[in-house]
Amino acid sequence: MFWRARTTSGKAICLSDQFPAIKVEEVMDGLVTFVKLPPVRLTTPVDWTANPHGNRSWALHLHTLRWMGRLVSAYERTGDQACLDRARAVTDDWIDANPRHGAGVSPWAWAEHAVALRAPALVCLSEHVHTPRLWDSLAEHGEVLADPSLYREGHNHGLDQDIALLVVGCRLGRARWRDLAVRRMTASAELAVDAQGVLHEQAPRYGLYVHRRLGVALRAIRESGAEVPERLVARRRALESYVAHATQPDGTLVPIGDSPADARADGFAHEGPLVRVFDGGYVFGRSAWDDPSAAYYSIRFGPGRRLHGHEDHLGLTYSAQGRRILVESGFHSYERTGYTDWTRSPQAHNVPIPTTGTFRPGTPTHLLHSSIGPSSQTYELADDAYGPLRTRRVTVNHDPDTVAVFDTVASGTLRSLWHFDPAFEVASRRDGAVVLRDPGGFHVTVLQFPGEGLAVRPALVSTGYLRTAEAVTVLSPEAPSVLTVIVPGRY
């Protein structure tokens, strides 16, 4: 395929500062560390089919070669030729061992996201290494990235594909690839992000990711000499409000969908209304901005589950007086395990579960009514995800802090699930009441009507990537309607 290399060399737009940080000495010694898992020593030559941790994300990161791109950056910073030589050797080894469609090649080698993340690293290397082998690989990456059948429109992977196609097109002097990338990312952004800023991937963490990557895209467009589309700028700007409102008083993103419980969103303007209803399916409310002790809550409704979303409709999270109180399962990993499947299920969220009927995944939920006052807000939501209509009415008060939730089902009975932060343990219980306490002596009282039959169970919730903790789950009595009142800081 040497014919691919016969092209005019163009500008190398190197985005090395966007690659994950590495320990250069570690990588030079043959070790790699991905997704916070223990270091792994690579063989020589590298076994590109290896996955010693049995982790999908680890295998992807191996093939992105962004760790190689950081070696190029180290060479540029220090002038250490050994770093560049190691980067070239790793890349040559990858190219030789991973022909596209080759027998025995890892499925991660040419996975669309691996291609999108690897191509910018190859562009960085091409500033210093000029070989037909590298040029041919860049051209092949460009052809894959430009292939409409492989493009993930309206998805964060598609944005990464567009960024990669733009920088490869510029490097190879192919303006049509650059222009295609700009057109696609603009149209894709308008599919992925609505006018209010809600990302349709249904996880605030991905809203943060797409915002950051759009910043990289805008920078790359400017460096390429192309005109920056105002429509693209507008969608990125809209995301900022969504991310800011999805940020809890402790600075972490609310763990809705595939959002880790420890993901932070710093640098966004905290301004505007204290309560915001997003038509894409979110209510975010707080008692104050920039006050770690402020009350905060989220409620889910809207379109059915897609992409990084969970079956969390009617779900509620809540924090008050500097404590997280009601939490959801959050995001554990992309591993295909029973626990990961559970984290996406209704049972992993603070929702009413009808005891009859069959759950229909992807059912939309409607926000029927909202009343937003300065110290009290009320919402009514409903869907027929289990057949009979289930309705939830939520009232949040800030003076004093209380939450009241009234769940009903049109026929049959239901049970309401409530997952509490792992810091809490049961202090006392009786019919219709449970008192929880954290190590600092902070109390939360849970009252339920009817009260007879209330149950307390342990459950595992995700506290971060590949991390879990045991938490208290309160399961209401079985009844046609259940009232739950949560009172923080009181007996």
Image (cartoon, rainbow, N blue to C red):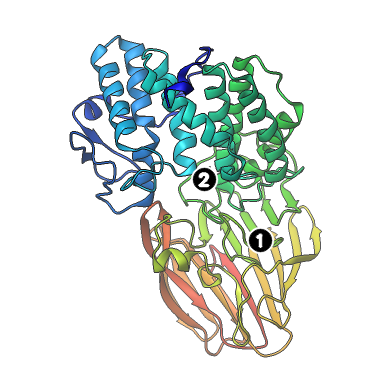
112 shown above or below 45: below
Q: What residue type is labelled 1?
A: Arg
- The residue that appears at 75% across and 53% down in the rendered structure is 277
Expressed as whole percent of the image width and height from the top left, the position of residue 490 reads 54, 66
The crowding category of the residue bearing disc 2, from other C-alpha atoms within 10 Å (few below 14, some 14 to 19, many at least 20), is some
Disc ID at residue 252? 2
State left or right for residue 131 relative to residue 205.
left
Query: In terms of secondary structure, where does tag 1 sit?
Result: strand
Residue beneath label 1, please? 300
Relative to the observer, which residue lies in front, 244 or 347? 347
Relative to the observer, which residue lies in front, 162 or 216? 162
Expressed as whole percent of the image width and height from the top left, the position of residue 141 reads 48, 31
The crowding category of the residue bearing disc 1, from other C-alpha atoms within 10 Å (few below 14, some 14 to 19, many at least 20), is many
Mark 2 or 1 closer to N-term? Answer: 2
Q: Can residue 208 be seen in this view?
A: no
Q: Nearer the viewer, mark 2 or mark 1?
A: 1
Q: What residue type is labelled 2?
A: Thr
State left or right for residue 403 relative to residue 25.
right
